[in-house]
Image (cartoon, rainbow, N blue to C red):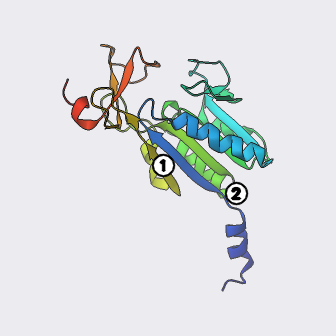
């Protein structure tokens, strides 16, 4: 059974999907950058993407709140990711919650070709509801890492992104002027 060439090819490909998720200010992008830089040190072929709408720190680079950065390609639609680098071994995707609902299918196609796909994004919106394609990605991933921030109210483990402004749009780019991390209890107090 294990001498079957189809079985060997399937497991030689090594493709996988990894999710790094959590609230605002939890270190998602920092962890994504860390994993991608390690891959670059290992001289692997890496492609990095972010939504074109994310221009908070830089037009093209993925940048963490601690201002660590890595070059990336901004794209309008997740299908554009499939057009880059036929020799790519690792694909990194930041701010995945802002991508369209086709992102899980794109990631499956890449993983099935042997690509290691590493994705970072918010798992919940400011109302504490599942956000964008992240829940579907979590369901199909080999590995899910949920990171937590520190609650600014009590110092506990924060898993929610509390919005400080009255804007009710689900998509609101912002920083500490718009959001703060909170634990479940402090999130539900206001």
Which residue: 36% across, 24% down?
A: 180
Tag 1 near tag 2, CB within 8 Å: no
Distance between mark 1 and mark 2 Cα atoms: 21 Å
Which residue: 39% across, 16% down?
A: 178
From the top left corner, tell me how far across and down residue 52 is, in percent: 61, 23
The quadrant of the picture occupied by the N terminus is bottom right
Instruction: Tell me which corner region of the image, top left, top right, bottom left or bottom right, holds residue 41.
Output: top right
- The residue wearing badge 1 is 145
128 to the left or right of 178: left
Q: Is residue 115 visible?
A: yes
Determine the secondary structure under disc 1: strand
Q: Which mark is residue 114?
A: 2
Which residue: 38% across, 21% down?
A: 179
Where is 100 relative to 9, above or below?
Answer: above
Q: Is residue 141 visible?
A: no
Sequence-wise, the earlier of marks 1 and 2 is: 2
How busy is the neighbourhood of tag 1: few (under 14 within 10 Å), some, or many (20 plus)? some
From the top left corner, tell me how far across and down residue 141 is, in percent: 51, 54
Camera-nearest residue between 64 and 60:
64
Determine the secondary structure under disc 2: loop
From the top left corner, tell me how far across and down residue 154 is, in percent: 27, 31
Q: Which mark is residue 157?
A: none
């Amino acid at each position: 059974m294990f001498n079957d060439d189809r079985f060997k090819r399937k497991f030689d490909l090594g493709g996988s999907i990894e999710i790094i998720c959590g609230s605002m200010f939890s270190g998602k992008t920092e962890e994504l950058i860390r994993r991608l830089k390690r891959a670059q040190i290992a001289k692997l072929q890496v492609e990095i993407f972010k939504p074109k709408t994310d221009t908070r720190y830089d037009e093209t680079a993925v940048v963490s709140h601690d201002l660590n950065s890595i070059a990336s390609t901004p794209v309008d639609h997740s299908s554009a990711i499939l057009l880059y680098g036929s020799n790519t071994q690792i694909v990194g995707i930041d701010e995945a919650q802002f991508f369209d609902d086709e992102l899980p299918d794109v990631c499956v196609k890449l993983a099935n070709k042997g690509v290691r796909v590493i994705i970072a994004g918010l798992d919940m919106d400011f109302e504490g509801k599942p956000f964008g394609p992240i829940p579907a990605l979590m369901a199909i991933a080999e590995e899910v890492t949920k990171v937590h921030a520190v609650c600014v109210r009590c110092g506990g483990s924060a898993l929610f992104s509390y919005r400080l402004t009255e804007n009710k749009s689900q998509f609101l780019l912002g920083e500490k002027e718009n959001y703060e991390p909170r634990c479940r209890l402090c999130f539900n107090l206001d």
